Image (cartoon, helix red, strand yellow):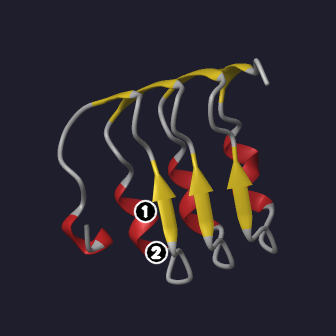
Amino acid sequence: NKLTGTIPSELGLLSNLQELDLFNNQLTGNIPSELGLLSNLQELHLEGNQLIGNIPSELVLLSNLQILNLWDNKLTGTIPSELGL
């Protein structure tokens, strides 16, 4: 895919979503903190974009998350310790 723009915060409303694959696109901006509302999310793939900023601390609320891929972006800051990485 060649998706561009930012990740819509409205994705956080998809409460039954189990996997979100937005890897290898040209997405920019911050990772929306609203993704922390995806209580059923098991896999989050955002690698290979141009995302900036910090990893939102709200991602620690994803108790079912098994796979988190954020590499190959322009993220800054530290990884929240609660993510167990």
Query: Residue at coordinates 77% horizontally, 71% vertically from top-left?
Result: 15
Residue 57: x %, y % from top left: 34, 59
Q: Residues within 10 Å of mark 1 (few under 14, many from 20)?
A: some
Residue 14: x %, y % from top left: 80, 62
Vertically, is 55 above or below 29? below
Instruction: Give the residue type at disc 1.
Output: Glu
Q: How many marks?
A: 2
Vertically, is 17 above or below 78? below
For the residue pair 40 and 33, the one nearer the viewer reads as 40
Vertically, is 49 above or below 8? above
Query: Residue at coordinates 44% horizontally, 44% vertically from top-left?
Result: 70
The answer to whether 77 appears left or right of 72 in the picture is: left
Mark 1 in CB contact with mark 2 (< 8 angstroms): yes
Residue 44: x %, y % from top left: 59, 57
What residue sits right under mark 2 in the picture? 61
The answer to whether 57 appears left or right of 40 in the picture is: left
Q: Which mark is residue 58?
A: 1
Question: Mark 1: which secondary structure?
Answer: helix
Image quarter where the N terminus lies is: top right
